[in-house]
Image: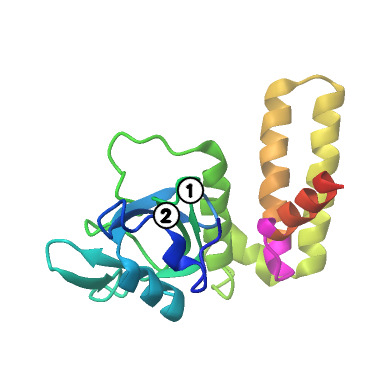
Amino acid sequence: MKITNDNASTLAWEKMDNLLPCIVQDATSGKVLMQGFMNQEALAHTLDTGKVTFFSRSKQRLWTKGESSNNFLKLVELSADCDQDCIIALADPEGPTCHTGTETCWHDGTAQPEISFISDLERVIASRKGAAADSSYTASLYASGIKRIAQKVGEEGVETALAATVKDLEELKNESADLIYHLLVLLQASDLSLNDVIQVLKQRHQK
């Protein structure tokens, strides 16, 4: 259930002594960033401000993630599970989430889902916009203009197809990696993201 101010009171507050666990996920990569607790006031504050806010059991007060570090969690959506006693917050992190300075609070011994690496890569590619052309290959691509970037996508697409045709699996993997990378650059240069493409695929899947 998507949580709004109108239905927040229907959650299982009484069952959970007015504190519901809230798991925060990166809205782009799906990585689990942290876990905290929300009371009704924290949930309302989260919805009203757009910044994920918890009830701190140690401080006995509302605590907005990032209030001291400025590493806020910008809310995308709140939803409850089937029993309405646990919350998931999809958020866009502004900097590292963990107080130790790492991206997530599960930084020791936790494997990164392979698909989430694409999101990390896309963010790095986006950060190269406006950088000096000689600072990185990605920056040099942006400087060369969208026609050259599009040409590179075409070249890599052909090389990927040729590798598949001759059944050179190692070359197919390498060329596919080049193709995906240059496609991500092309999307960013066009002010689009992989998420925009995924939305199209989801719409087609629903038909």
Residue under circle 1?
A: 81
Give coordinates of residue 114: x percent, y percent. 53, 37
For the question of whether residue 159 can be seen, the reply is: yes
Q: Nearer the viewer, residue 126 or 192?
A: 192
How far apart are the alpha carbons under marks 2 and 1?
Answer: 7 Å
Residue under circle 2?
A: 87
Find out whether residue 189 is within the magenta segment.
yes
Q: Is residue 105 above or below residue 175?
A: below
Q: Which residues are magenta?
A: 187-195
Q: Is residue 170 above or below residue 50?
A: above
Residue drawn 82% across and 66% down? 147
Give coordinates of residue 10: x percent, y percent. 45, 62
Element under label 2? strand
Q: Nearer the viewer, residue 147 or 111?
A: 111
Q: Quadrant of residue 20?
A: bottom left
Answer yes or no: do the residues labelled 2 and 1 have beta carbons within 8 Å? yes
Residue drawn 41% across and 48% down? 32
149 on left or right of 108: right
Give coordinates of residue 9: x percent, y percent. 43, 67
